[in-house]
Amino acid sequence: MFFPAAEYNNTTRITTINTHLFKTEGKVLVQPGWLQVYGKKAVVGDEENLVAVQPNETVHTQEIAHHHLETKPPARFSEATLLSAMETAGKLVEDEELRSAMALKGLGTPATRAAIIEGLLTEKYLVREERALIPTAKAFLLLTLLRGLGVTELTMPELTGEWEHKLSQIEKGQLSSEQFMQDIQHITTTMVDRAKNYTADTIPGDYITLKTTCPKCHQTVKENYRRFTCTSCDFSISKVPGGRAFEITEIETLLSQGELPMLDGFRSKMGKPFSAALRLNNEYKLEFDFGQPSEDQLSQEHDFSDQTTLGPCPKCNSNVYETTTTYVCEHAVGAEKSCDFRSGKVILQQPIDSEQMQKLLTVGKTDLLNRFVSSRTKRAFKAYLIKKDDSTIGFEFEARAEKKPSVTKTTTKTTTKAKQQKNLIS
């Protein structure tokens, strides 16, 4: 004798409170069936089930909680997940025939997919950050180029699907191999001809005209495929200095003020990340500022009269102020400098804002900061910055939870063994 099956209604419920609509999804138990053995009833809700209600039934609002949440972007590809995505790329194709042609194919073959990824890494279209693969500005520029040239098929899996479909037709005798090769030749010729007829200045795209005028001649500055260029003089700067693309607000600030504060996200030619400030020199050329001033710059007098001090210097107890790239003691600059305290605005890729520096100088410790990256292991870590007894800045790490004593493990094993023996005897 067996109890009947339990029956649920999968339910989407819309509740109206004033003018606001709230959506609730869940299931309603309508026939408990075999769940009666466990005391389940059809009309009683629990954490998994919704309470059954009738349409247009009036309910009472007992509590309203307002939560500020943010959506999270999808996780970045690792080599393993990218290989899997390449293998199942046919799922992204909308056309039914092309999708079925790619069902067992994907992008590349099992023998070439890993080599394709390595090629992207070698050519700096991707960089590794721990397990994640990060697309570079060079990759985005390539996509802009292909779209501007009107050859977007190179950026989409449909092209592979179309070729696989035609190869399938050849296999079934529905298409000749000569016709297939003629199509390939036509596509290749069209792409090459389009590429030949464009220069960096004429590649179409959704480019903007900057609001800020040229710092050299005060005329209009426009964006093209690779650069921001003045329409009247020879002023021009790269859109992607150090492998990092400018935000529009950043380039506007650079042209209006001649400098930008410390930024992260740059990469050297070897692919190593670094942070730097940017400025235009006397010849209106773009330069990196790594926060290491020359002796001439240190000997120059600085006027801090219009700035608010962040706190006392840990070395001489004078005032510490903020500059473009560093936090500096007022007596560490000028011809008669008597202190050498200086701290960068970025430490091991972790930006240090003025609020945290103020806490460090006044309280002796920052909040827990979670974007440090070890220069030796390249791994991210969390730490506090602290003011040490010798007046230098150091790290303090979170206290680790104490491990349970090994005696507990031994006891657990012994107990388990005893239970097993008891079961065997019985």
Image (tube, rainbow, N blue to C red):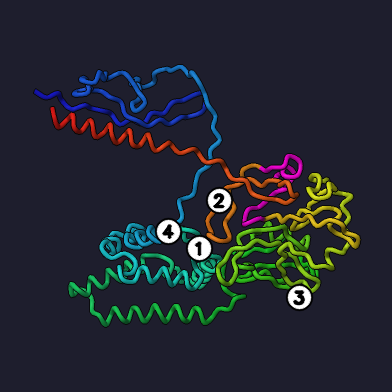
The mark that comes first in sequence, 3 or 4, is 4
Q: Which quarter of the rendered picture does the N terminus lie within?
A: top left
The mark that comes first in sequence, 1 or 4, is 4
Q: Does the magenta stretch include residue 260?
A: no
Disc 2 designates what residue? 381
- The part of the chain drawn in magenta is 347-366
Q: Left or right of 301: which side holds 404?
A: left
User: Which residue corresponds to the image point at 85% horizontal and 48% vertical from the top-left?
Assistant: 318
| Mark 1 burial class by Cα count in 10 Å: few <14, some 14-19, many 20+ | some
Q: Quadrant of residue 222?
A: bottom right
Mark toward the viewer: 3 or 1: 1
Say above or below: 8 vs 259: above
Disc 1 designates what residue? 135
Disc 3 designates what residue? 233
Q: Residue furthest right?
A: 336
- Under mark 3, the amino acid is Cys
Identify the element where label 4 is drawn: loop
Identify the element where label 3 is drawn: loop
Q: Return the x and y of residue 305 as percentages of the image width and height.
A: 89, 50
Q: Which quarter of the rendered picture does the C terminus lie within?
A: top left
Mark toward the viewer: 3 or 2: 2
Say above or below: 281 vs 45: below
| Mark 2 burial class by Cα count in 10 Å: few <14, some 14-19, many 20+ | few
- Under mark 1, the amino acid is Pro
Say the numbered circle drawn on residue 330.
Answer: none
- Under mark 2, the amino acid is Phe
The mark that comes first in sequence, 1 or 2, is 1
Identify the element where label 2 is drawn: strand
Mark toward the viewer: 3 or 4: 4
Mark toward the viewer: 2 or 4: 2
The Cα atoms of the two marked residues, 2 and 4, are separated by 20 Å
The mark that comes first in sequence, 2 or 4, is 4
